Amino acid sequence: MFTSSAIVRENEQGNMEMLITTPIRSIELMLGKIIPYIIIGLLQVSIILTLGYTVFDVPINGNLWALFCITLLFIAASLTLGLVVSTIATNQLQSMQMTIFVLLQSILLSGFMFPYEGMPQVAQYIAETLPATHFMRLVRGGYFKRCWFY
């Protein structure tokens, strides 16, 4: 939601045209928009894992570096999805509505709230396109089965 709203806001204010006229390439511009959010996401995961381990005694059974690599891929995929939303949306309200629509689908269909196997076949097909579904599988595999890739 943050990436899509920030980019749409820059489009509305006219800042994006100024950034495009600078001598940087498009990929550098997009990476500059994504990398700060990746760092913030990894810091949040570190804080959550530390609090889970120290306060609630949740053991970390899997490889910690593998967890961070999986999390990095998930954050990058989610932020890229935000960039796609920002290219479609024309204003911030539309951007937030589209992001909430994708976010709700991710939460409901990823297996976080309801079991994946109990969903209708159509919902399972939609869930396979969402990064959160694969992230949930990998994290659960690492914590409950003591392995990271199954």
Image (cartoon, rainbow, N blue to C red):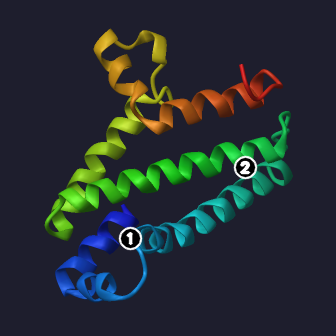
- Find disc 2 in the rendering and name its residue: 68
In this rendering, is residue 12 above or below 111?
Answer: below
Direction from residue 114 to residue 139 in the image, left or right: right
Q: Nearer the viewer, mark 2 or mark 1?
A: 1
Q: Residue 32 in the image: x percent, y percent?
A: 49, 74
Instruction: Determine the residue positioned at 45% across, 23% down.
Output: 114
Question: Which one is nearer the viewer's eye here, 10 or 109?
Answer: 10
Mark found first going from the N terminus, 2 or 1: 1
In this rendering, is residue 34 above or below 134?
Answer: below
Mark 1 crowdedness (10 Å alpha carbons): few <14, some 14-19, many ≥20: few
Direction from residue 4 to residue 29 in the image, left or right: right
Element under disc 1:
helix
Q: How many marks?
A: 2
Q: Residue 120 in the image: x percent, y percent?
A: 32, 11
Direction from residue 115 to residue 92 in the image, left or right: left
In this rendering, is residue 125 above or below 63?
Answer: above
Q: Residue 26 in the image: x percent, y percent?
A: 38, 70
For the N terminus, the quadrant is: bottom left
Instruction: Determine the residue positioned at 38% across, 32% down.
Output: 108
- Find disc 1 in the rendering and name its residue: 26
Question: Which one is nearer the viewer's eye here, 98 or 56?
Answer: 98
Q: Amino acid at mark 1?
A: Ser
